[in-house]
Image: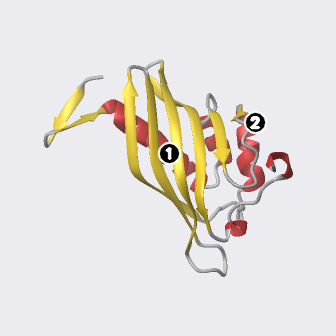
Amino acid sequence: MAARRCHGSAVTEDYEAIRRLSYEYTFLLDAGDFDGVAALLADAELLPVMRGVASAPITGVAAIRAFYADQVVVYDGDPRTRHLISNHAIAVTGDEASARCYFTVLMKPPGEPYQIVVGGQYRDRFVRREAAWRFAAKAIHVDYLNDIGLHFHIADAHAV
């Protein structure tokens, strides 16, 4: 796709499409829409890299949905989280792309203060198929944890 010039820096439709996918992932997750998350990652390999979670790739809509539904704590269907993405670095080569960014998860559990729960990095791969970008892989590297029990619990099926 052709690059556009904006104030001297190249901005491409590809980069924006990839950013939108990354943001959509966080919007769906924060809404507790695990069906939507699984559909977004339908063709991808999910690789959670965190203490206590098996690092085998998770594939397929049903398995990805189950991973989130079994482990993300919800309050009346709402995880009560906000995922923030920063330092988004994207590299596009033809119909493939990679991206890396930091994520910070804020949470407001009932009866608790608004707090930072977890921080880490997403390392993603994308492919363009039928003129649309899709996730090919999503690696979630957890770097820092606070009281994760209010947000996430490790289901037996995924425990190390």
Q: The N terminus appears in which quarter of the rendering?
A: top left
Residue under the image location 65 percent in, 38 percent down: 46
Residue under the image location 71 percent in, 49 percent down: 68
Seen in the picture, residue 17 relative to 151 is either above or below; the reply is above
Seen in the image, is 102 located left or right of residue 44?
Answer: left
Q: Residue furthest right?
A: 156
Seen in the picture, residue 131 relative to 56 is either above or below; the reply is above
x and y percentages locating residue 48 in the rendered image: 66, 45
Q: CA distance from mark 1 to mark 2?
A: 19 Å
Q: Which picture quadrant has residue 80? A: bottom right
x and y percentages locating residue 38 in the rendered image: 65, 39
Seen in the picture, residue 140 relative to 99 is either above or below; the reply is below
Label 1: element kind? helix
CA neighbours of label 1 inside 10 A, class few (<14), some (14 to 19), many (20+): some
Residue under the image location 52 percent in, 38 percent down: 124
Residue identifier under label 2: 62
**Disc nearer the start of the sequence (1/2):** 1
Seen in the image, is 157 located left or right of residue 97?
Answer: right
Residue identifier under label 1: 24
Seen in the image, is 128 located left or right of residue 10?
Answer: right
Q: Which picture quadrant has residue 148? A: bottom right
Residue under the image location 76 percent in, 54 percent down: 52
Label 2: element kind? helix
Seen in the picture, residue 116 relative to 152 is either above or below; the reply is below
- Amino acid type of disc 1? Glu
- Amino acid type of disc 2? Ala
CA neighbours of label 2 inside 10 A, class few (<14), some (14 to 19), many (20+): few
Please say if the residues under marks 1 and 2 sit with CB atoms less than 8 Å apart. no
Frontmost residue, 147 versus 4: 147
